[in-house]
Image (cartoon, helix red, strand yellow):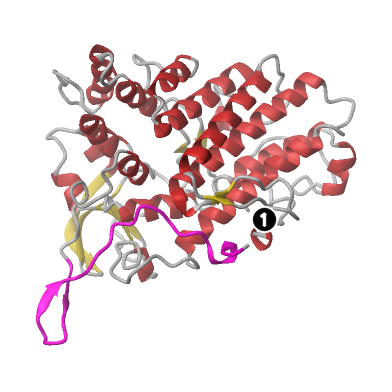
Amino acid sequence: MKKILFILLCAVVTFGCEIDEQVNPNAPAVETIAEGATETDLNNLVTGALARMRNSYPIYATATGTITRELYLFDADPRNTTDLIGTEGDLDNDSFYSTANWINRYRTIKNCNILLESLDAAASSVSAAEKDGYRGFAKTLIAHQFLVLYSAYFDSGIRLDVEDPDNFGPLVTDDAQVLQFVRDLLDEANDDLTGAEFSMIFTSGFSGFDTPATFSEFNRALAARAALYAGDMTAALTHLGDSFFDINGDLSVGPKMIYSTTGGDLLNDLFKTPGQNGNQIFASDTWVNEAQAGDLRVQNKVTQRAASFSKSGITVNYETNLYATSTTPIDIIRNEELCLIYAEANIGTNNVEALAGINAVRSAAGLADLVGTVTVDDVLVERRYSFWGEAHRMVDLRRTGNLNDTYITLDNITTTDADGNVIPATQEIFNQFPVPLDEVGN
């Protein structure tokens, strides 16, 4: 753990924002921050955290998507298919799909912890209300990163106590405890935001969510997601009421991670040039074929290729069109998800509202309204098509007890036995990633 987390400050990119001139605005000295952080120092930490949280997200999205057979990344590394569909046995705890997400989530958390630690000794020019603003921001982002870790590693375990780099806490394998920790942290952050002031610099991805009041709506949206994962539907509905949820509003509204071609910045690596074979994300044919006729989400997210393509025994006909360019933003959470949380949270108590939530999404997808009683399966279908390629499917199926071959169509892959007979290849459906090797026993 120390090998991974003892990084006091990650590289910071500026996203084109104007930052006060200093010796090195991309990496302020930790000693300077600890002794009396200025507003510029604190804002650089904010910028660094927003930059770092993007790292390895494409690996996380494609790896979880492959486990659930909604998509495949065909590139030079065969582990993107053979490992993740289980034809090579268990997942490797020292491969990129296990380590990259872990490393970058904890580096982001470290950035935010430095920000929190710097506030008590911050320069006198930073007001108490501004300090509360930084606290609310940092705790919200930490909670989000832990929620991603929970989604990926589940009861393999994650470390919740990582504030002291010389004394990390144990791996916590109780998923209920992890979710409660996340929910409590989000509540703390939201309390901090009450009466706070923001003097920080946000990226354009947080346009509309860059005041304490509107950032609180983002916080409450994350709280609704965490409550849903915990099965606390009453709390999920309460949090939605304090979020930016709008059943009649634009489904695309919500904070986003942004990308740019600026030197040193990141591109959206989930964008793939159309028509290529060597580095391409493909949708499973099953995902396309099982969609309801006329579902606009299918034609908006994937494109049919001129000819089939095969690799690792998998044949595909559709490639990603999810992101238009290499600088297209990626949603952190959006109103579309909030509408479906609303639908699911109302199942069994208020079917009229459950229908309203699900039909808001179906209408935008060009589909007729559902009628009758809404079920969890109905919501899972809509989430399957609304969030293709966005790392939702694995946690959705797992939390509803459906991460199995009833809900996942295994690929028609064959192998040859010792007698020369062609037989179906052994496959696995994994429900989580293993804790990285460097963490085992530490």
Q: In the rendered image, which quarter is residue 198 located in? A: top right
Q: Where is 370 relative to 281, above or below?
A: above
Between 133 and 279, which is closer to the camera in this rendering? 133
Q: Residue furthest bottom?
A: 419
Q: In the rendered image, which quarter is residue 187 located in? A: top right
Between 119 and 279, which is closer to the camera in this rendering? 119
- Which residue lies at the image location 35% right of the left edge and 16% below the top edge? 247
| Residue 285 rendering spot, x and y as whole percentages | 18, 52
8 within the magenta span: no
Q: Residue furthest left?
A: 421
Residue 235 seen in this snapshot: yes
Between 59 and 206, which is closer to the camera in this rendering? 59
Residue 266 seen in this snapshot: no
| Residue 214 rendering spot, x and y as whole percentages | 57, 19
414 within the magenta span: yes
Looking at the rendered structure, the kind of residue marked 1 is Leu
- Which residue lies at the image location 61% right of the left edge and 47% below the top edge? 52
Considering the image in quadrants, where does the N terminus appear?
bottom right
| Residue 365 rendering spot, x and y as whole percentages | 23, 28
Q: Which residues are magenta?
A: 413-441
* Label 1: few (<14), some (14–19) or many (≥20) C-alpha neighbours in 10 Å: many
Q: In the rendered image, which quarter is residue 44 located in? A: top right
Q: Decide if residue 292 is on the left or right side of residue 384.
A: left
| Residue 425 rendering spot, x and y as whole percentages | 19, 70
- Which residue lies at the image location 50% right of the left edge and 27% below the top edge? 223
Q: Where is 127 relative to 94, above or below?
A: above
Residue on which disc 1 sits:
5
